[in-house]
Image: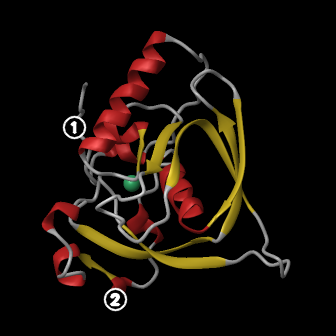
Amino acid sequence: MAVHEILKMGDPRLLRVAQPVTEFDTDALHLLISDMLDTMHAANGAGLAAPQIGVDLQLVVFGTDAVNPRYPEAPPIPRTILVNPVITPLAGDDGLLTEEEGWEGCLSVPGLRGVVPRFARLRYTGFDQYGDAIDRTVDGFHARVVQHECDHLLGILYPMRVRDFTRFGFNEVLFPGLDAATDD
Ligand code: NI
C-alpha cells in the first residue's frame, strides 16, 4: 500500500496536458494504478487522475462504493481504470446536447465545493491497464465524474469551469450538516 501526496491547486504540474500511455500491462503501470487506488481510497475520493500525484500520463481511476461518505447521495459507479480516454458528448432523446449543473469537489482543491455545468450524457472510450478497449455510454453522476477526471488530463481544475461564483465556497459553510470527514 502506497498512499501518495495529492498535489494541490497552484502546483504547475496540475496544469499540464498529460502524455499518452504507450505501454500497457507493465509492472510500472500496475504499480502506479495500485498506488492511485490506495491514494483515492485513503482520501475517500470518487476519482483520481495521475497528474494529481505528479505523474504526467493520461490515466484516471474512479468509482464509488454504494456508500461514499463524500458523495452519500450518489449512485455507485463501477471501479474503472481508464487510460488514454476520449470523451464524446451525446445528445439526449430531444436531439440536443444538454448540460446539467451539479456540485463538485476535488482532492486537489481541499475544503471547497462549487457548482459546475457538465454534459449530461456522453460516450467515453479508452483502454484498461491491459490495453483492452473500454467503450461506455453514461449519464448523470457517472458522466460528471468522467468529465471531472479527464479534465485533469488537460490541465483543467473544476474551479476553471465554475460560471456562477455565488455557488462556490467552503464545504463547512455551504453544507454545515455534513460530517467533517467528508471534507475533500
Ligand atoms: Ni479532481
Residue carrying label 1: 5
> What percent of the width, then of the height, locates residue 45?
33, 51
Q: How is the image coloured?
A: secondary structure
Give the alpha-carbon distance from disc 1 to disc 2, as whole Å: 30 Å
Q: Give me the disc on residue 166.
A: 2
Is the residue marked by circle 2 packed among few (<14), some (14-19), or many (20+) residues within 10 Å? few
Q: Is residue 54 visible?
A: no
Q: Quadrant of residue 171?
A: bottom left
178 w.r.t. 47: above or below = below
Is the residue marked by circle 1 packed among few (<14), some (14-19), or many (20+) residues within 10 Å? few
Query: Mark 2 is on which residue type?
Result: Thr
In the foreground, 9 or 133: 133
Question: If you read the primary sequence from the N terminus, does the residue marked by circle 1 or circle 2 appear first?
Answer: 1
In the visual, does 112 lie left or right of 134?
left
- The C terminus lies in which quarter of the figure? bottom left
In the foreground, 122 or 41: 41
166 w.r.t. 93: above or below = below
